[in-house]
Image (cartoon, helix red, strand yellow):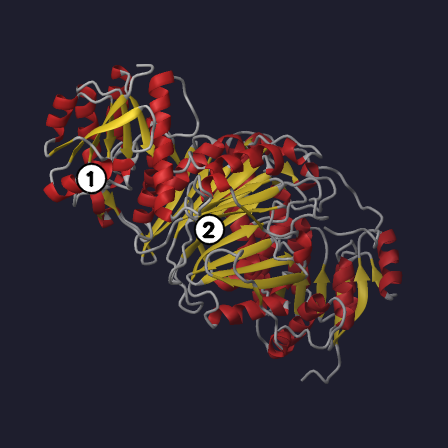
């Protein structure tokens, strides 16, 4: 099936994250990256040179039509994901890999998924931890009883930015990863606080509950971030209730999240890595790392030290599950593209589907909805699909905060992504 | 009272909570005090207590003991907390100046309110045997928060998860952890809870009388979230653990620059980690066990057994009560009625929050058992 002509892929949005998507497309079998699109000519030129692509377009719609693309990789800012994905689906592409988060509102995510369903397009959201062999190995270990029955989970978000921003940038990965093992959350109770800013971590205390006056656009809250819409909070905590899941073999549990703003690097030389601790009746599984690398350890019994940590090492079968056995660099982005090619050609959903991506956003928006209602337990999926913070502003007669005008910036492919 | 030997009377109730966790001998090694009498309705229990304490007299009737002996201090030993209010009120009525009470103080907040009112009006000093604040490890952890790992961000408590898993674990053992949380972060401002029975959400009709007079309880999995002043948050979990012999019981303190794990105190182990987030990576640092000989070993350098640690804990409480009666003042290494109130609110708040489906502010508006309140159609 894969021996035919490679699928033709185009990349939309030549910002920093396009680097991983381009590398993935170059390395994945069965696909050829043939064209780039960006509304900003300097970015387009730099990316064209870096990625070795000479077909470049200022209008992505023109690119899709002229290049007869099968696949597009959407690397634009989050608030433009919906119009780009919906238009690409309408123009006849067969598969779309969209950078996370899926969008900035659930209403956008709904429209993206509906449009792709209507046009028979496979939509994938770039939560690449699903394609990391160690996370597959973790599923296998849990299924084989490594920690007994799952009875709880603790999540820690990365701390390099205010929690409101981090939820959309990094925690979306954490939520997506938890769902592999936990299933579908039934409800959430959220709590956001803010504190003084500074380079001394101690200045992050004391905190106070975030109010409607603390709502800001992501780039106003943390100027180096991408546009992720309205955000709130320096720290965030949440409890998610997961109901019984026969397929995953648990009878329901609660999962706690902490997201702290840690403005400086820790003494160990870096920001924290996002992590999940899965508490079972017979031990604890620890999954920690980054969006591109996850270490998995198990310790039997409740506490790690003084007990022995056992690393869960992926098998060749786990690698095959992740389609990462045939790529050397940027394997997980290549695996995401490879999986999309298979999804398109074989007619199945991508293992990081649009619906999965929407669930991660659902969990974030649920936290906001709960916080603005005093931490009330809020059922998921949410009934109201517009942004909870926008509704909070509207219902209190608070003006929408000013959105920073960032414009298009010259692309630096060397800029470190956090 | 300065210079005088304080007269101590002890009450227990064999087969109804006995003398609690060796409460009858709490004053055995406290200078400036003397155990003069014990009371127990059960003859064999009474006689055994007489031998253990070396008291001169034994009574079957508690009230008669109070009338006859006019003690300065009364030790309330029975674990059954539904008897505590009556025993305390009787002692206050007989002019007792100091009371050391087994935990929990009461099964309801309104009972604590009445006890608090009586103590205030009579000037009686009441200390709770919560067995946490007197522990040197707890004070070491507080010092570490101030000097090395702070500010404190979060606390994670986990129940023992034995046969009592769920609300019984929360009421009986969570109380110690909640008292520790309040010690480190102050009294919580509100809580949110989720309680399940075999995986389904608890409903009010699940409430059943718990053991040892703790009132109505229900649920074999409890999750609670507490908001403390200055943005410090606390989690409590009591969920099923199947591994034989493993105790999940303990509290982790997560600071900006480190973590401290108080595991299964007073008999367990204490660890510290040099970063604010644990990573199982040798390059990130290692957990280090902390030992404090003052607690772990007796005066002869011999490692204390579990029972000896309980005795030492009781001795410290008893000594603190004597000192407060003799010298006055306040101290932070013991729990008073206020700490008992906070700890009981932290056990009752999560279930009330669960039944209401929203946060519960402290002090709680519901002062009786939440399950009883439902029957009175008073739940919001």
Mark 2 and mark 1: Cα distance apart in space: 54 Å
Q: Chain of mark 1?
A: B
Q: Residue at x 58, y 60 (%)?
A: A287
Residue B175 x %, y %:
36, 40
Q: Chain of mark 2?
A: A
Please tell me which residue lies in front, B244 or A360: B244
Residue A346 drawn above or below residue A230 = below
Dot 2 falls on a residue whose secondary structure is: strand
How dense is the environment of label 2, judged by Cα within 10 Å: few (below 14), some, or many (20 and up)?
many
Residue B140 x %, y %:
52, 36
Q: Quadrant of residue A250?
A: bottom left
Q: Residue at x 11, y 41 (%)?
A: B42
B87 left or right, relative to A333: left
The residue beneath circle 2 is A240
Q: Quadrant of residue B20?
A: top left
B323 left or right, relative to A257: left
* Callout count: 2
Residue A127 marker:
none
Residue A84 x %, y %:
69, 57
- Of tags 2 and 1, the one toward the viewer is 1
Dot 1 falls on a residue whose secondary structure is: helix
B237 left or right, relative to A211: left
Q: Quadrant of the N terminus of chain B?
A: top left
The residue beneath circle 1 is B51
Please tell me which residue lies in front, A194 or B291: B291
Q: Are marks 2 and 1 on the same chain?
A: no
Residue B145 drawn above or below residue A71 = above
**CB under 8 Å between discs 2 and 1:** no
Q: Residue at x 66, y 49 (%)?
A: A79
Residue A281 drawn above or below residue B106 = below
């Amino acid at each position: 099936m894969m021996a035919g002509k490679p699928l033709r892929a185009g990349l939309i949005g030549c910002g920093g994250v396009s680097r991983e998507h381009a590398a993935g497309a170059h390395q994945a079998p069965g696909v050829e990256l043939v064209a780039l699109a960006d509304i900003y000519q300097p970015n387009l030129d730099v990316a064209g040179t870096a990625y070795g692509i000479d077909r470049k377009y200022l209008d992505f719609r023109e690119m899709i039509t002229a290049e007869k693309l099968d696949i597009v990789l959407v690397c634009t800012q989050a608030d433009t994901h919906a119009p780009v994905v919906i238009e690409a689906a309408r123009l006849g592409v067969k598969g779309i890999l969209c950078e996370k988060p899926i969008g900035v509102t659930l209403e956008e995510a709904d429209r993206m998924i509906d449009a792709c369903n209507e046009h028979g397009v496979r939509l994938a959201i770039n939560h690449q931890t699903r394609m990391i062999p160690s996370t597959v190995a973790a599923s296998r270990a849990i299924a084989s009883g490594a920690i007994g029955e799952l009875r709880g989970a603790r999540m820690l978000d990365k701390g390099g930015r205010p929690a409101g921003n981090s939820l959309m940038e990094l925690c979306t990965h954490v939520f997506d990863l938890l769902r592999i093992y936990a299933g579908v959350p039934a409800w959430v109770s959220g709590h956001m606080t803010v504190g003084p800013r500074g380079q001394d971590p101690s200045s992050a205390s004391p905190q106070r509950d975030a109010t409607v006056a603390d709502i800001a656009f992501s780039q106003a809250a943390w100027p180096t971030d991408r546009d992720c819409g309205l955000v709130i909070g320096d720290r965030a905590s949440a409890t998610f209730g997961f109901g019984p899941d026969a397929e995953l073999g648990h009878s329901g549990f609660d999962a706690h999240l902490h997201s702290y703003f840690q403005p400086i690097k820790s003494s160990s030389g870096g920001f924290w890595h996002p992590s999940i601790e899965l508490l079972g009746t017979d031990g604890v599984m620890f999954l920690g790392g980054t969006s591109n690398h996850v270490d998995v350890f198990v310790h039997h019994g409740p506490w790690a030290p003084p007990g022995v940590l056992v690393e869960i090492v992926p098998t060749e079968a786990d690698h095959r599950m992740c389609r990462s056995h045939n790529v050397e660099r940027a394997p997980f982005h290549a695996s995401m593209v490879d999986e999309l090619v298979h999804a398109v050609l074989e007619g199945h959903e991508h293992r990081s589907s649009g619906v999965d991506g929407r669930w991660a956003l659902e969990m974030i928006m649920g936290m906001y909805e709960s916080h603005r209602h005093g931490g009330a337990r809020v059922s998921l999926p949410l009934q109201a699909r517009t942004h909870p913070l926008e509704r909070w502003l509207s219902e209190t007669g608070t003006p929408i905060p000013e959105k920073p005008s960032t414009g298009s910036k010259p692309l630096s492919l060397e800029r470190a992504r956090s | 009272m300065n210079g005088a030997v304080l007269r101590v009377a002890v009450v227990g109730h064999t087969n109804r909570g006995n003398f609690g966790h060796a409460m009858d001998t709490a004053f055995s090694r406290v200078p400036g005090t003397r155990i003069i009498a014990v009371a127990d309705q059960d003859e064999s229990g009474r006689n055994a207590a007489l031998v253990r304490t070396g008291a001169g007299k034994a009574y079957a009737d508690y009230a008669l003991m109070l009338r006859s002996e006019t003690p300065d201090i009364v030790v309330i030993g029975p674990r059954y907390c539904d008897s505590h209010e009556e025993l305390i009120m009787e002692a206050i009525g007989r002019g007792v100046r100091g009371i050391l009470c087994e935990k929990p103080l009461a099964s309801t907040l309104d009972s604590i309110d009445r006890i608090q009112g009586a103590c205030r009006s009579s000037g009686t000093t009441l200390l709770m045997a919560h067995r946490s604040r007197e522990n040197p490890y707890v004070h070491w952890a507080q010092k570490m928060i101030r000097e090395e790992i702070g500010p404190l961000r979060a606390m994670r408590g986990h129940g023992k998860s034995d046969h009592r898993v769920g609300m019984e674990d929360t009421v009986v053992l969570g109380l110690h952890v909640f008292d520790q949380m309040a010690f480190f972060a102050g009294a919580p401002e509100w809580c949110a809870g989720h309680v399940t029975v075999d995986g389904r959400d608890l409903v009010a009709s699940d409430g059943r009388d718990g053991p040892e007079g703790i009132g109505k309880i229900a649920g074999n999995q409890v999750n609670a979230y507490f908001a403390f002043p200055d943005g410090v948050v606390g989690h409590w979990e009591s969920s099923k653990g199947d591994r034989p012999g493993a105790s999940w019981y303990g509290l982790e303190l997560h600071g900006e620059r480190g973590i401290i794990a108080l595991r299964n105190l007073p008999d367990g182990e204490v660890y510290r980690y040099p970063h604010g987030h644990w990573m199982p990576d040798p390059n990130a640092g290692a957990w280090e066990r902390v030992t404090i000989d003052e607690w772990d070993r007796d005066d002869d350098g011999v490692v204390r057994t579990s029972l000896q640690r309980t005795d030492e804990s009781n001795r410290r409480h008893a000594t603190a009560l004597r000192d407060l009666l003799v010298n006055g003042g306040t101290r932070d290494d013991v729990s008073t009625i206020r700490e008992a109130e906070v700890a009981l609110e932290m056990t009752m708040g999560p279930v009330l929050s669960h039944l209401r489906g929203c946060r519960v502010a402290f002090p709680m508006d519901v002062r009786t058992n939440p399950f009883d309140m439902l029957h009175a159609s008073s739940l919001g």
